[in-house]
């Protein structure tokens, strides 16, 4: 017997000429994996075909060339997808999305979004009617730009339309110049290299220009690393011109890293650990010097958790004898990738040379380390070639060079089971830009899938912890560049989680913790919301909290039994 399912739709509707405000039309469609009959649709049909079939029934306007959102996630339209695929270099083509939104099959979309969809335009600000957008109105924002740059031809001006839908993915307000516009400028810079300085000047504003870019990878149905690469190329080119800004953004990155002395120590050290005793871990603590409060919170919770779960950890003396360096973070990765990778590899090497696996408590830093290890497989033609050649053999001699604490937890939490008296907990998790962007490049198991395994182990059949994943951008890297944006956007994201009913906000990076915890009062004020006491926590802190509740409840039950 053929199984029949039902697709429940809520479709955005709005006609600015007739409607006072937008509304959603509800519609239910039956689908089958076999040959459809009557009004049924097949799971092999594409989104474009489905929308076309219901547009006349519901009297709605649709334009798949622009794109749309399903449950808050953007599916790029035919035009921009084609443009990005065309721009991709040969070595990157295999990771770019070849399928456009209209060509996605129902089967694939059901796997991602389930059978309840809220379909919306990419933006409600530029709606022409229903799911169509007024690209001409978006064009008017850039008239001054074209007036200043007469070398841009009429045909080139028309090409802006292909990029404009990408402006609508970010949560930034309309004063922000737009990610699609930045890609258009990058395209122009390739065609008119003699005008590069003028083009960079047009996007140099620190508040609304390219430096305030925040990756949109986790807002896309199919992440497209080419977007980040092109925009970061512009950032790098601009910072090469603006030395005063560049020095401010990366001022703390290199002062903690003494290449000669640290590398000498690593090379002089020998593996003193007994390999028959299994893996011993040492905690990574090479965070920005100004993040003392945040990093201390993470390290302390990791140490306590490792002790509770009997995870072999280097003693305090060994930890104190190794100085892990800060790799510089977001802007250093963009402006000095060689240093960023070299510093990250050297941290791994220091731990491995002493027989330890380097253990990361935050997932963002773990992803950076994974990127560095991946670079060992690349034939480097830059200044770190010799360093990487010497490092590869040493690091690869370790069975497990690095580890993420979340992966260890899944293996060790099976001995704990929830008591019936333990209370339910609602947790909203956030994904940092580092995580989302690097996951798409590294083809990593997603952060959400990793931590879901931890929560499954904690729950063990008893749904006491409810995990919700909030898809949003992360602006924590803008703290020293665009403080107002950093505070407002961080508050916007934080309160979205709170409004979801979260008891705790789970973060995956030091920078996110600072934005959601240390700066919570300032960001709430900047956003115009009352201060809220909902705490931000790292995964180790959350697990500790839950385990203490479990053990406390078990102890209470034993006391009652006695």
Image (tube, rainbow, N blue to C red):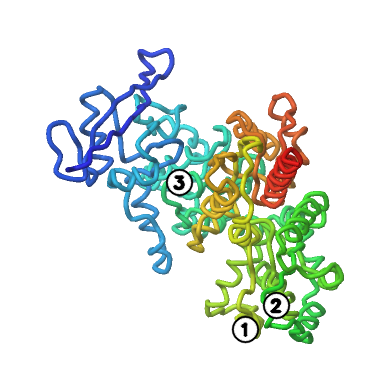
State which quarter of the image contains the N terminus.
Answer: top left
Q: Earlier in the sequence, mark 1 or mark 2?
A: 2
Q: Earlier in the sequence, mark 2 or mark 3?
A: 3
Look at discs 2 and 3 and give the one toward the viewer: 2
- Crowding around mark 1 (Cα neighbors within 10 Å: few <14, some 14 to 19, many 20+) is few
Q: CA distance from mark 2 to mark 3?
A: 37 Å
- Crowding around mark 2 (Cα neighbors within 10 Å: few <14, some 14 to 19, many 20+) is many
Q: CA distance from mark 1 to mark 3?
A: 38 Å
User: Which residue occupies 60% across, 30% down?
Assistant: 501
Residue annotated with mark 2:
352
Residue annotated with mark 1:
397
User: Which residue occupies 35% across, 19% down?
Assistant: 15
State which quarter of the image contains the C terminus.
Answer: top right
Q: Tell me where residue 334 appears, x and y as whole percent.
A: 62, 60
Q: CA distance from mark 1 to mark 2?
A: 9 Å
Q: Tell me where residue 264 appears, x and y as whole percent.
A: 79, 83
Residue 261: image quadrant is bottom right
User: Which residue occupies 42% across, 12% down?
Assistant: 20
Residue annotated with mark 3:
220
Residue 368: image quadrant is bottom right
* Element assignment for label 3: loop
Vertical position of residue 137 compared to residue 326: above or below: above
Look at the numbered discs 1 and 2 and tell me whether their residues touch, using CB distance below 8 Å.
yes
Look at the numbered discs 2 and 3 and tell me whether their residues touch, using CB distance below 8 Å.
no
Q: Nearer the viewer, residue 192 or 333?
A: 333
Q: Is residue 359 visible?
A: yes
Q: Nearer the viewer, residue 389 or 333?
A: 389
User: In the rendering, which numbered label is found on residue 536?
Assistant: none
């Amino acid at each position: 017997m053929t199984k029949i399912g039902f697709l429940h739709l809520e479709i955005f509707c709005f006609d600015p000429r007739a409607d006072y405000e937008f509304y959603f039309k509800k519609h239910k469609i039956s689908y089958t994996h076999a040959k459809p009959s009557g009004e049924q649709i097949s799971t092999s049909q594409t989104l474009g075909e489905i929308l076309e079939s219901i547009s006349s029934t519901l009297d709605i306007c649709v334009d798949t060339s622009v794109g749309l959102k399903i449950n808050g996630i953007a599916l790029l339209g035919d035009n921009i997808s084609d443009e990005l695929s065309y721009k991709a270099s040969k070595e990157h083509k295999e990771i770019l999305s070849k399928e456009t939104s209209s060509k996605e099959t129902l089967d694939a979309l059901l796997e991602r979004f389930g059978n309840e969809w809220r379909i919306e335009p990419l933006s409600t600000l530029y709606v022409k009617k229903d799911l169509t957008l007024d690209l001409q109105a978006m064009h008017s924002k850039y008239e001054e730009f074209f007036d200043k740059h007469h070398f841009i031809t009429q045909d080139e001006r028309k090409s802006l339309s292909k990029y404009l839908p990408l402006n609508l993915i970010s949560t930034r307000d309309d004063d922000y110049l737009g990610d699609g516009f930045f890609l258009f400028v990058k395209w122009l810079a390739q065609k008119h290299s003699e005008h590069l300085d003028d083009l960079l000047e047009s996007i140099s504003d620190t508040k609304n220009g390219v430096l305030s870019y925040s990756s949109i990878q986790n807002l896309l149905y199919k992440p497209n690393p080419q977007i980040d690469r092109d925009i970061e190329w512009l950032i790098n080119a601009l910072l090469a011109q603006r030395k005063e800004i560049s020095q401010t953004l990366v001022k703390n990155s290199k002062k903690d890293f003494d290449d000669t002395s640290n590398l000498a120590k690593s090379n002089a050290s020998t593996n003193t650990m007994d390999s028959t005793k299994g893996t011993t871990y040492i905690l990574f603590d090479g965070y920005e010097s100004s993040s003392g409060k945040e990093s201390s919170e993470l390290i302390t919770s990791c140490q306590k958790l490792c002790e509770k779960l009997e995870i072999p950890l280097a003693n305090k003396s060994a930890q104190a004898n190794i100085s892990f360096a800060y790799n510089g973070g977001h802007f250093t990765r963009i402006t000095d990738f060689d240093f960023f990778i070299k510093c990250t590899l050297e941290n791994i090497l220091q731990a491995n040379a002493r027989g330890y696996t380097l253990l990361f408590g935050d997932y963002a830093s773990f992803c950076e380390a994974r990127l560095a290890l991946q670079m060992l497989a690349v034939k480097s033609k830059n200044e770190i070639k010799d360093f990487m050649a010497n490092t590869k053999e040493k690091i690869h001699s370790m069975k497990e060079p690095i580890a993420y604490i979340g992966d260890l937890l899944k293996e060790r939490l099976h001995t704990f089971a929830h008591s019936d008296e333990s209370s339910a907990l609602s947790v909203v998790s956030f994904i940092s830009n580092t995580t989302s962007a690097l996951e798409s490049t590294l083809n990593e198991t997603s952060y959400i899938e990793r931590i879901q395994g931890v929560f499954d182990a904690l729950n063990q059949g008893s749904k006491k912890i409810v995990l919700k994943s909030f898809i949003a951008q992360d602006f924590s890297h803008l703290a020293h560049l665009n403080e107002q944006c950093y505070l407002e956007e961080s508050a916007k994201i934080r309160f979205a989680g709170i409004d979801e009913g979260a008891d705790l906000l789970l973060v995956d990076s030091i920078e996110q913790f600072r934005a959601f915890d240390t700066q919570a009062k300032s960001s709430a004020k900047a956003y115009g919301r009352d201060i809220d006491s909902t705490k931000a926590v790292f995964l180790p802190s959350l697990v500790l909290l839950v385990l203490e509740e479990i053990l406390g409840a078990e102890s209470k039950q034993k006391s009652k039994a006695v």
